[in-house]
Amino acid sequence: MKNIKVGILGATGMVGVEYIDFLINHPWFKISTLAGKKSVGKKYGEAVKSLKNVPREVEDIEVVEPDPKKFDADLVFSSLPSEAAKDIEVRFIEHGFPIVSEASAHRMNPDVPLMIPEVNPEHLELIRIQKKKSKGFIVTTPNCTAVGLVLSLKPILDYYGISKVVVATYQAITGAGFPGVPSYSILGNVIPYIKKEEEKVSEETKKILGRFNGDSIKYAGFPVEASCARVPTIDGHLEAVYVETEKEVKVDEAIEVFRSFRGEPQKLNLPTAPKEPIIVTDLEDRPQPRLDVNTGTVPGMSIVVGRIRKGESNNVLKYFVLSHNRIRGAAGTAILTAELLLAKGYLE
Amino acid sequence: MKNIKVGILGATGMVGVEYIDFLINHPWFKISTLAGKKSVGKKYGEAVKSLKNVPREVEDIEVVEPDPKKFDADLVFSSLPSEAAKDIEVRFIEHGFPIVSEASAHRMNPDVPLMIPEVNPEHLELIRIQKKKSKGFIVTTPNCTAVGLVLSLKPILDYYGISKVVVATYQAITGAGFPGVPSYSILGNVIPYIKKEEEKVSEETKKILGRFNGDSIKYAGFPVEASCARVPTIDGHLEAVYVETEKEVKVDEAIEVFRSFRGEPQKLNLPTAPKEPIIVTDLEDRPQPRLDVNTGTVPGMSIVVGRIRKGESNNVLKYFVLSHNRIRGAAGTAILTAELLLAKGYLE
Amino acid sequence: MKNIKVGILGATGMVGVEYIDFLINHPWFKISTLAGKKSVGKKYGEAVKSLKNVPREVEDIEVVEPDPKKFDADLVFSSLPSEAAKDIEVRFIEHGFPIVSEASAHRMNPDVPLMIPEVNPEHLELIRIQKKKSKGFIVTTPNCTAVGLVLSLKPILDYYGISKVVVATYQAITGAGFPGVPSYSILGNVIPYIKKEEEKVSEETKKILGRFNGDSIKYAGFPVEASCARVPTIDGHLEAVYVETEKEVKVDEAIEVFRSFRGEPQKLNLPTAPKEPIIVTDLEDRPQPRLDVNTGTVPGMSIVVGRIRKGESNNVLKYFVLSHNRIRGAAGTAILTAELLLAKGYLE
Amino acid sequence: MKNIKVGILGATGMVGVEYIDFLINHPWFKISTLAGKKSVGKKYGEAVKSLKNVPREVEDIEVVEPDPKKFDADLVFSSLPSEAAKDIEVRFIEHGFPIVSEASAHRMNPDVPLMIPEVNPEHLELIRIQKKKSKGFIVTTPNCTAVGLVLSLKPILDYYGISKVVVATYQAITGAGFPGVPSYSILGNVIPYIKKEEEKVSEETKKILGRFNGDSIKYAGFPVEASCARVPTIDGHLEAVYVETEKEVKVDEAIEVFRSFRGEPQKLNLPTAPKEPIIVTDLEDRPQPRLDVNTGTVPGMSIVVGRIRKGESNNVLKYFVLSHNRIRGAAGTAILTAELLLAKGYLE
């Protein structure tokens, strides 16, 4: 149907490789350019061999520099490290590219939408403000830990109101890229610190759940208190969530609130939209990263919520949420955002 | 000096083996009887070979049944599973033994002290109430997860007052005994559920931090909201703690409050008392189970607190705490409690 | 096309669950009966929830007893533990069922074929001898460690001749079933012992590579010296193989010998036959269990051979081979064997 | 008694930190200088905080450059990476320092002894040849994998003669230094390749077991065929060894041959010499890295041999051997070699 050429910045990294499977068979997007830093000139398959066995179709594509002139693309995905993203992404915007970026560099800029398509599709209107200044524009997706949290909070916020969130995380090693965490540091261990992560989870949550008032976003007002830790799992960020709500909570009702949640991508039937963005498990010891991270109609795109229970007061809801950090937390949400951009006419 | 004969119930289990090193060179206690269930008649070294290489001195002791008649002891430690403990411990009390038990079976009985010697030594007076009914008596030690939490909360409670606690845990596999968690279930995974653990952490915390009013304990009144998960570490329960305090918190001051904390065992200079019950680390990514679980003058007996920071309000303190689940969380606290019993004259 | 009803004995075990995905969409076989021991009366999805999320189609099937009368099947797969298999399988044979079993109980019986369809399809003729005595019959598949070894040895044997094999293994925990290896025993560890495994690898290799002379199998004559160890991986048995050959070996030639190998299943184009039974990797640090265990056209059915190199003499070939222990090493080879039985007319 | 000042090159690495505990309380050696590359000017405790909590005594020592002029030492230990060692060690020799190095750079030089003190103490006489050319000299210790293998082969060679060795290894991640192996590469995985390792194991084994004929070493003549793999363990290289012997082997006898082995360090009662260099375990599933790596009177200095069994012929002996890669395989053997140097008068 559509035929949009897409390039990927940071295509050889831990998240970059996760775009490939989604895009190889995508009905709208076609991979045209793959950029990496250390692997320029190498074949893509060779460049990422330590990370993944990639499909034949992309094995022999030559990796190019992250330079706008090398890109033959209608849309650019950026999976760059934040430091690199700062300048490179600006250069691509100036060259007129629309960018969907998971890098943190520009997430908190007032004019830049920070997107979870099911949660805040209306924030895309910020693009109009960007377009007054440049031909290209940038849309960002959140920190991998924030995505699962916020997507799970959205229906609770809408139904009960939220006055406080306390969250502790169990984050997979792939969240740190490659080579990332040394094995000596994490094998049989937990590292209770991830640089700037707690700040990001707190601030980004408030921005995404904020209200767009026509020309800017008014942040959500409740505190979000995060404790972030790395654990020896491969994929899947698990989070222990404690929420104080404005209205009284009933567990059965909350389960139904999670289960029935649908967003714009589901209504528009976007290609990468899972049927259920939030899957509720009623098994007593789930969700578990290794067993549940790919649950749902689009593997890696649904979050799984479990152990839904009340706290000691009637205004406290507790649960665990699991999200695939490289897919829903990164590549998948970026692709879903691009689909939403296309569906809403922002790529014309 | 003293020469107290001690027997161990459940000596062949995951925690049972941790008593040995402490008792082998203990100035007051001498191992006289080792009881196990499945290994009756076997030599102790053979019975625990999958768990630990034990010292020569105990290798050839024959494991006996958990029967009071088989025990030649002035004091009995119990490391029994809770189900078994229910009846067996009662039988030992009836035979006149003083018991220090880490089993959960009798922890919440109104007349039974639930002890962390540094936190609530005055609760030992409940023994007098027990002694009105029987010759023997029982003193319990808390759930392994509660110990680290409560020991870290004690100085905060005393200095700032506490109005709410939210805690998420990263618990080592040894907390589940042996064979315990199947490797298929935990390798590269997290299990966000430990049966009855969250309830224990909540209730036991309130009992231990409760006030003894002469004949019973008035529980602490603040909510304790726990989310408990198992992670693939061998030893050391790590916990992400969020505390709302009554007075405003300053971080530097809180650090000093933790650091300067000393309890009765330190004042009495008990053999198994670490110099500092709470060690504060100022390394940004610590405490870590594998690197820090044995820190301090008595390995496994100090808890380590780190990443002490404020929340979004001035009445919120956040930190991580690590405690050795088999030592401070079990065998070590039991031995320290026995030392306190002896020092306070309860074993005469 | 065909429509064969199949039942599974041991369907709720670590290997049992691996049959499901293969059979759900199978062109010839339809699942009719699922038997388990501890889960009789439960729904299948509930019974195996700790192992795998199974497809909707089988979730609600009720697990039945391993009793021939409960089976409505044209063919029975057995994934029983060896002890149980001894009697139960005999009972099914007596009731006239054809059985394909991965249990070790009857593997070494002289009249029982021990099958890797690519290696020794002619051994199926032993069935005729069985059929003289009973209506039903049994065909077995090898120990999961033997499968990868033997499949890799077959082309070497045919091309160079073999005079000695020395093999050391790195076996995944799923090879031990569920609950299997306790996490305390294997986390950050290696266990250099698997009961009876080294004997099985040695004896089964000689039987499978033996010659069928019309009424019995003459075992291969060379020594097979195995050292078997368990490592903390989930799926995929890796093996370090040292082979002394009769003719001189050249590495490039050996690579081609592995690569060009095809067996009867490939010639017959059986549904579960991978295009290449042996995939050769030329990446210097492969095959690796986590990255390569599902390589090939039928995930889990190809073995991957790498690091092919000569030894200090011209008659020594060394390599590593990886095989999926639950698929090629168990369920997959059983299904492929059943397909061969059907294709060869043994199920009529 | 003695009072030898020692400096350490590469003191901040994965092995460097293992020298500290041994030297802190050493009766002969006193730490005087600690050199590192990236941490020059930092305090030692800070420089190695990700690796180990070091004792107070060395915490505040300032790390210096690997420059002979910065060294106040009678003896220098080198734990440098091989590339760096090439030039730096030569510079130290030229400045007249005696060096004991675990780096591979100079191991295979004809004039350089490659030492396992229990195995080839007579090779130290090569120092005399070096001393004809320079004031300083260098003695090396073997690759961490070779040490355990060779130490276990020595008594077998002496008693039975050896005609062939085939070995497969299960090597701990600390063998790769820090940051070393990325966690993504090894978690739940095995990597069947370690650069140049197999060559080192083969060649070094033959050198160490070679005969010193007065002015050079005649290498041992049998083939040593190695397959080396990395597994997710922290410390302890395990090896599956297959040996063809010249004389017939009896298992009970071989056990006694291992057990009764003593070397020069035991005879001289050197401070770091374990009472038994080879400990034989008769538990059926041992040695295991996590449980056995510190067995013996000097933790980490004994190797543990188990599963001793015959092969299919009478001239084949098979066993597993475990050695602590950072202690017996590196720092410990270096210190023991230095003690031998001192005892034999080479440091005067």
Image (cartoon, coloured by chain):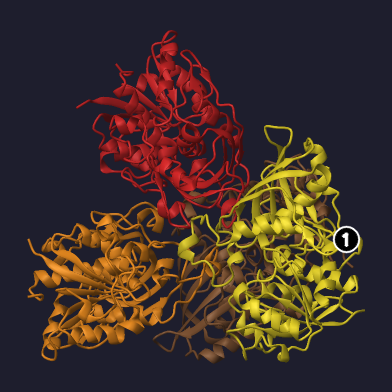
Chain colours: A yellow, B red, C brown, D orange
Q: Which quadrant: the N terminus of chain D?
A: bottom left
The residue that appears at 80% across and 74% down in the rendered structure is A130
The residue that appears at 37% across and 51% down in the rendered structure is D283
- Residue in front for this viewpoint, B79 or C311: B79
| Dot 1: chain letter | A
Is the residue marked by circle 1 packed among few (<14), some (14-19), or many (20+) residues within 10 Å? some
Instruction: Please give left or right for residue D340 compared with residue D40 in the image.
Output: left
Q: Quadrant of residue A283?
A: top right
Query: Where is mark 1, residue-wise?
Result: A264
Instruction: Please give left or right for residue A56 compared with residue C279 in the image.
Output: right
- Find residue A111 and report its horizontal and vertical position in percent: 77, 69
Q: Relative to C206, is B93 above or below?
A: above
Q: Relative to B267, is A154 above or below?
A: below
Q: Quadrant of residue A7?
A: bottom right
Q: Relative to B106, is B24 above or below?
A: below
- Find residue D246 and report its horizontal and vertical position in percent: 27, 75
Instruction: Please give left or right for residue A184 compared with residue C94 in the image.
Output: left
Three-letter amino acid code at disc 1? Glu
Instruction: Please give left or right for residue A5 compared with residue D72 in the image.
Output: right
Asked whether residue A122 is in view, the answer is yes
- Residue in front for this viewpoint, C7 or C158: C7
- Residue in front for this viewpoint, A347 or C76: A347
Q: Which quadrant: the C terminus of chain D?
A: bottom left
Q: Quadrant of residue C67?
A: top right
Asked whether residue D253 is in view, the answer is no
